[in-house]
Image: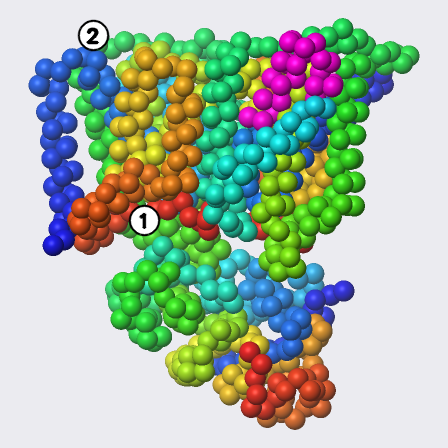
Amino acid sequence: MTAVDFLNLLIAAVLLAGIYAVMSVGMTVIYGVMKIVNLAHAGFMMLGAYFAYELFERFHVDPLIGATLALPAFFLFGMAVHWLLIRRLPKSDQPTLSSLLLMFAFWLVLQNVGYLFWGNMDRSIFTPRTLKVLTLGPISISLLRLIVFFAAVLCVCALQLALSRSWYGRAMRALIQNPYAAQITGVDDERIARITFGLGTAFAGFAGALLAMLYSFSPDFGRPFLIRAFVIIVLGGLESVSGVAFGALVLALVETFSILYVPAGYQPAISFGLLVVVLLVFPRGIGGLLERKWRPA
Amino acid sequence: MKRFVGNFQPLFAAGILLVVLLLPLLGLTPNVIRILFITFVWITASLAWNLLGGVAGQVSFGFAVFYGLGAYAAALMINAGVNPALSFVGSAAVAALASFLIGIPTFRLRGPYFAIATIGVSEAVRVVMNNISAVGGAGGLRVTERGIFRQTEHYYAGLAIAVLAVCVSLLVERSKFGLALRAIRQDEDAAADVGINPFRCKLWIHAIAAALTGVAGGVFADYAAYIHPQGVFAFSTSVTILLMPVIGGIGTIWGAVLGAAVVTIVEEQLVAVFPQVHLLLYGLLLMLIVLLEPDGLVGLLRRILRRMHVDPSSRGPDKALWGRGRLEGREL
Amino acid sequence: MAALKDVSFSVPERHIFGIIGPNGAGKSTLFAVISGAIRASQGRVRFRGSDVTRLRSDALVHFGIARTHQIVRPFRAMTVLENVLVAVHYGRQSAKADAKAQAISALERVQLAPKARMLASALSLGEQKRLEVARALATNPDLLLLDEVCGGLSGAETRAMLALFEQIRASGTTILYVEHDMKAVMSVCDRIAVLDFGRKLAEGTPAEIQNDPAVIDAYLGSGMLGTNSIA
């Protein structure tokens, strides 16, 4: 393998990591504050993809703009879902079976909604940008992937900034670190939870819209990405944005470079293989969530 | 005046068994026999899942792996001329072995993380099986017909494994192993504090559950004569297996059986009439259960019986039948 | 900053050994290290000559070390009897006959036998604490680790609990008792170690501790010595 090939693959991996990061950050935020493992994340991503698709097909809205519009749209949607459903769950400082099954059930519902509206044919978003390739000397980069990468990184950085500066971010971190103390000091946990769920959903929708530019999709679209998001979380820890970035990078690197060694048919199983290796080699888990249910800050 | 339902449960169960044993002799249509057969297969898988998910509290979204492996193992053995009954034993063995390979890394994870990991396993196995041309790859595998198709033979095979699953479930629930599993479900760390090795217990119940599910897959393969990864290893298969005990009443034997019956009938009738909405229905049903009646149909029945001033509690150690499995906030 | 530094002591067999200290002294950390919940960066925990530092709870039980929890953790959906029964089944078997009989006798020691068929969740806090002790005893331990068992108990309940500890010691089991309630510790322990800011301040009999100037200094003005207790 030449240096140029290596560089090409490396760049491809980094670009992929960006999108993986923005995809996982939504799940992380919801888990950190509410201790809910959001299986419906896959469903929201799928809806985000179709959201961008519809805007593109009907109103000729550039999918990047569509993705940006997805943020507020899905933020409101997420808050509505929280108000309707999530807040009725029994509260706990640990992940519960009820929350797991509820989110799973909601995912089923979302999938079916997808099938009802759009059928089970694969769709894709095809713009003139889709095929453009940037060439810097011997290196070629897909323009689309580059744009998506920057959009993703921008978003994640904005999130990190918002978390560290805003009152919401402070309240959120307080709730993550010590829910009881936070409540005593007057943090309105239900309001924060609603905003958090909205935020997580917004990111899911945004990520889905971005992914729609890169891949074809159907209502079942979210599942392989859900698994990847999970692997990233296990790798990087469930409670920090930088952890997600790290996990995303590792997974993207492994997936990209595995093309050299693993037959194409087995590609989808890579992420799980990585998970197994990590679990075997780091039995106590990198994220610290494996042996202990709940990690105090 | 309260009447104790509990005392009548063994009689009730025996009655059902008798009826079911004699049904084929009553001249029912082949379609009904077919539906009953499918129900028996699903009852087996449902009870199996309940052992791991209901009793031990480890929710797995990946039981299609064992179902599929059992199906393929039986198919390959039958094609090679092995006696079907022996092939089913092979199914159980293969599934149990797989459960160890899967459990050893994944049981390091708790609760929902374990659940998501099982989704990954399921998908990974499906992808792998799709690619192995030696067992047919994506095209699937034909199972050699053994003489003419005798429906009643399959019917009784299905019934036999369903009864086996019930017996295994009863045995587990009444044993000290069952007690340990319930302790693990409620509080894994406290269970370790009294000397239970949660990891080892989880592996063993996983193996038992996997073996039963594998046998179900094997019996199905023998009947279906053609299996493919998109069917037996499908995520929707895992979902169905999980939904049955949860809808029926997680943690209870009646719940698993009832849930399997309900789901099978819904699947069979619904697929015909409303193919578009069955995910929606399951989703809504599951949401209702989680939010309103975590004990599923069995829980609903209990409430109704209480309204009628009949005490549903059982005398003696029959907790397995009505059970106390709950989707409580603390129990993951 | 270390939660614990250079804390060293030996617990003689058939003693009740108390560990006390103000809040934040490191008592809970010490307990967690001994019971295997937390890994210490340095140091060893030895039990009758064997190194048990890295062992998990279930392995410790088979060595003969059982523990209770500061925040009670009964198996709520199981009956009182079942809670103890599972401990009998999976603890250290003492080669006696009937598991159920052993469970009942453990319950009798804590006066919970009449409530055997109740669900654990239906018990009061004091009863649940007694259930924890019964459950730990049912594993047939040689060393019982108690974690702030008297928190939230009434005066009468506390006295009953302390009497129980003396019975347990009399039957041959050693007790390591981490506690916040100074009065309880002074009245029942044979030896006491005092922690402050992660270090061992003093060790000795209750009388020695009460007169130790360093200890008095640490607790000065908090009214914790003598007959007043804060808990």
Kindly give the residue lying farthest to the left in the view shown. Answer: B26
Measure the C-alpha gap from mark 1 to mark 2.
Answer: 46 Å
Residue carrying label 1 = B324
* Percent of width and height locating residue B57: 41, 44
Tag 2: residue type?
Ile
Q: Is residue B81 left or right of residue C1?
A: left
Which of disc 2 and disc 1 is earlier in sequence?
A: 2
Query: Residue B135, relative to residue C37: is it above or below?
Result: above
Coloring applied to the structure: rainbow
Query: Residue A59, relative to residue C88: is it above or below?
Result: above
Q: Which SS class for mark 1?
A: loop
Residue B148, disc: 2
* Percent of width and height locating residue A265: 58, 14
The answer to whether residue A118 is visible is yes
Is residue A63 covered in magenta?
yes
Prevailing secondary structure class for the magenta stretch in the rendered image: helix
Query: Residue B315, relative to residue B76: is it above or below?
Result: below
Span of residues in magenta: A43-67
Front in this rendered view, residue A53 or A98: A53
Q: Which SS class for mark 2?
A: loop
Image quarter in which the C terminus of chain C is found:
bottom right
Q: Residue at x 73, y 13 (%)?
A: A62
Q: Residue B245 sits in which quadrant?
A: top left
Chain on which label 2 sits: B
